[in-house]
């Protein structure tokens, strides 16, 4: 553990202690749910969350320093979305306390409309990161059709993954990138203990005129969930099922496919595909 002064010196401008910032009501549309594939964080290195209206918890022992400026997002579900507040649009990335109740996040589905009390984590240099008070989280409804989803998500669609990768430490940690073309889905066996059978990566080009092509691993929660549902299939049929769903169905020629991409804990981490946005053209 680092002393607090050392920890803060490593981080982006410290505006305030996030555990002392008053929570506000955050209403957002879940865009994607991903998994880091890593073990869940060790419970309780930080202070417990305080329900709104209660006195703040007394300062605890110094927390373990995040790697380089972003909170620890490893393990369990990793939920991103977009704000539904027309006055404050923007990406939302939930960063729960270590030791959080994973079941509450696991139940969220992409395109759920969610209301939660949350504290902004702006001291970490990313305006999209929020620490939710999970006991306050409510799912209001689910957007079933592409048309209402488009209304909220199309303004976020960008064309250049190349530009994001040129400045990975200074740009946003989340983006929705429309693919010019998707050339393949690479699958390889997952050798990690407790992992699923196959990991996968999309090969695609973005709309940058000089795009040399990208290959980004898929960490979409449903990519793992599908494999768990099909656990009885032999390898070749499982690979075919993954390709049928993630390549031939979602990236069909009549779909305007775009990828939710995000960085993990460190600004220097590469981008990964958190989910697929595939409305009809
Ligand atoms: Zn590109």
Image: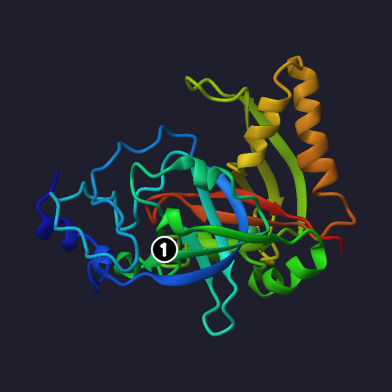
- Quarter holding ligand 1: bottom right
237 shown above or below 95: above
Q: Residue at x 55, y 43 (%)?
A: 106
Could you tell me which secondary element the residue under label 1 belongs to? Answer: strand
228 shown above or below 104: above
228 shown above or below 142: above
Count of labels shown? 1
Relative image position of residue 171 (x, y in whole percent): 46, 67
Residue at mark 1: C-beta within 8 A of ligand 1: no
- Residue under label 1, please give it: 130
Direction bottom: furthest residue: 87
Specify the quadrant that holds the N terminus. top left
Quadrant location of residue 80?
Answer: bottom right
Relative image position of residue 102 (x, y in whole percent): 46, 41
Q: Residue at x 78, y 58 (%)?
A: 144
Residue toward you, 154 or 101: 101
Display colour scheme: rainbow
Quadrant location of residue 237?
Answer: top right
Q: Residue at x 49, y 35 (%)?
A: 37
172 shown above or below 45: below
Residue toward you, 7 or 41: 41
Relative image position of residue 79 (x, y in whole percent): 53, 53
Relative image position of residue 254 (x, y in whole percent): 90, 56
Specify the quadrant that holds the C terminus. bottom right
Residue toward you, 159 or 132: 132
Direction right: furthest residue: 254
Residue toward you, 205 or 136: 136
Q: Is residue 120 left or right of residue 76?
A: left
Q: Residue at x 34, y 41 (%)?
A: 99
Q: Are there few (<14), some (14-19), or many (20+) residues within 10 Å of tag 1?
A: many
Quadrant location of residue 18?
Answer: bottom left
């Amino acid at each position: 553990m680092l002393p607090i002064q050392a920890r803060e010196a490593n981080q982006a401008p410290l505006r305030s202690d996030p555990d002392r910032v008053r929570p506000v009501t955050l209403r957002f549309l879940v865009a994607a749910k991903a998994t880091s594939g890593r073990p869940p964080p060790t419970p309780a290195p930080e202070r417990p969350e305080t329900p709104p209206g209660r006195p703040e918890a007394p300062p605890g022992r110094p927390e373990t320093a995040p790697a380089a400026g972003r909170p620890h997002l490893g393990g369990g579900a990793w939920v991103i979305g977009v704000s539904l507040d027309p006055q404050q649009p923007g990406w939302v990335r939930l960063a729960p306390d270590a030791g959080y109740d994973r079941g509450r996040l696991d139940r969220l589905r992409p395109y759920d409309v969610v209301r939660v009390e949350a504290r902004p984590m702006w001291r970490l240099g990313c305006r999209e990161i929020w620490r939710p008070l999970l006991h306050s989280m409510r799912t209001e409804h689910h957007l079933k059709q592409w048309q209402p989803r488009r209304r909220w998500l199309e303004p976020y669609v960008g064309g250049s993954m190349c530009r994001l990768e040129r400045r990975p430490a200074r740009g946003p940690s989340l983006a929705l990138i429309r693919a010019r073309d998707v050339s393949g889905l690479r699958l390889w066996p997952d050798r990690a203990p407790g992992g699923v059978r196959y990991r996968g990566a999309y090969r695609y080009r973005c709309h940058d005129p000089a795009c040399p092509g990208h290959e980004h691993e898929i960490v979409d929660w449903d990519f793992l969930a599908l494999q768990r549902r099909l656990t009885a299939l032999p390898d070749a049929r499982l690979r075919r099922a993954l390709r049928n769903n993630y390549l031939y169905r979602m990236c069909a020629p009549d779909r305007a496919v775009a990828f939710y991409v995000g960085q993990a804990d460190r600004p220097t981490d590469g981008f990964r595909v958190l989910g697929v946005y595939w409305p009809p053209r």
